[in-house]
Amino acid sequence: MKKTLLVALLLIGALFAVFANGDEETATPTAASSKAFQVPATGYDGSDVTITFYHTMGTNLSTVLDDYIVEFNKLYPNIHVSWEAIGSYDDVRDQISTQIFVGSQPNIAYCYPDHVALYNMAGAVATLDNLIDSTIPVTRADGTTETLGLTAEQKADFIEGYYNEGKQFGDGLMYTMPLSKSTEVLYYNKTFFDQNGIKVPTTWAEMEQVCAQIKAIDPNSIPLGYDSEANWFITMCEQYNSPYTSANEPHYLFNNEKNIEFVKMFRDWYQKGYLTTQKLYGAYTSGLFTSTTGVTSYMSIGSSAGATYQRPAKSADGTYPFEVGIATIPQVSETNRKVISQGPSLCIFDKANPQEVVASWLFVKYLTTTIEFQAEFGMASGYVPVIKSVAQNEVYADFLASADGGDYVTALSAKVCLEQEDAYYTSPAFNGSSTARDQVGALLPKCLTLTDDNQIRKAFEEALDECEYHN
């Protein structure tokens, strides 16, 4: 109900803005309806401006941010950055959605793609293409200059999958910049695998064999736990090159034979006791993986940013019950490697004063391209830096070098993430894309419990109907 009200408010706001301008032909806002931001001929003119930034950072990350705001202000003393920690990502979305209606939204915000698609219904997000491509020189307070936009080297330094997330809104324009990212990885009990000569699975075919091996060794175990059913469904669509959604009509494409086929395959695995998921287990499956008593699992697929939750508690003697191994999630084929890209990006909101937008861009550019910030923020958050050059930073390189399956499991997780940079994908973003995610996230565990194939087909049809009903 809350999401429906937000959409209604944005529609009303968008229509009001359109009719106020006398442009009736564009009265229906689309999922990506922002106008391209036009960079002033002067670029940043040194104006004294205050920009606001909404995020969800806790104290440790806010401290890192504050330190680098100080450094940014040494370069741009007239750009005053104020921030507010709102709560959860959805809290940020909800607050901004209502503020857009009265024009009081912040300058910069943490965002996920479906949030941006929602904001775009009122044309509130500034597109970044002209800023990114600008060659206007900007003079800093210390007398040095920089290009307002991104240099070719800076563009190439971004991990491609993370950078391209900003262009998934159906019109080819850039709406967001990546700040820090996470993905999914395969956690496994390395001690158990080594003791039993088990090879870490790299494909789903190998995963089935490994689950059978583990079940033979420990019949009471559930070999694999998968935390996010939605991620699993969407990732399998990507790995099979099977349709899931589209940024353009028709949006919802997931009810097809290939997707039904892989769901039935995992249903068979579930019936054999090979796997469980967060919804079926009733909690994060890391609890099964780290358990040392009762029913346990020996593999867990979860967020790379949650590595410490996949590590067992230390024993009384100060050692860990087992060593954690981390690998890329299994693939359908090595020729089409796909792993989901997650984590916050930054969007900039359009403002009546273009200098606020340009100043916001300079700050976003600073956060996303400054190696030291990306390194320190990544180590403090557990998320992965979005630029490749961070790996050569001395402090971050030492962090990666410390990687192990115990005290430094976070570093091991980050190392795996950086090694699979060519595999990241993002899904199309449109108003309603989050509904599709919710529906397939509920569809998969439901189907795992169904023994009748016709019931599975019916479940797919019902999920599709729900998407179209809420669109």
Image (cartoon, rainbow, N blue to C red):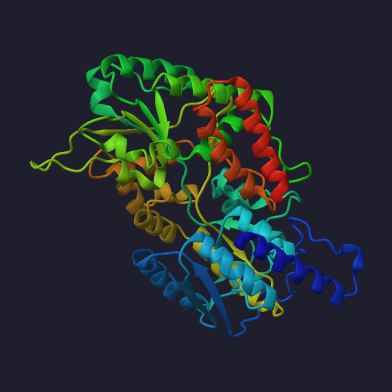
Describe residue 191's horizontal placement relative to residue 182 as left or right: left
Q: Picture coordinates of residue 108 (x, y %)?
A: 58, 69
Describe residue 423's horizontal placement relative to residue 18 as left or right: left
- As drawn, 25 above or below 216: below
Residue sitting nearer the eye, 22 or 80: 22
Q: Picture coordinates of residue 226 (x, y %)?
A: 43, 34
- As drawn, 94 above or below 203: below
- As drawn, 109 above or below 380: below
Q: Picture coordinates of residue 456 (x, y %)?
A: 60, 26
> Which quadrant of the figure contains the N terminus?
bottom right
Q: Residue at x 52, y 65 (%)?
A: 91
Q: Residue at x 43, y 21 (%)?
A: 207
Q: Picture coordinates of residue 15 (x, y %)?
A: 81, 69
Describe residue 408's horizontal placement relative to residue 63 as left or right: left
Residue sitting nearer the eye, 143 or 338: 338
Q: Residue at x 53, y 60 (%)?
A: 90
Residue 158 visible in the snapshot: yes
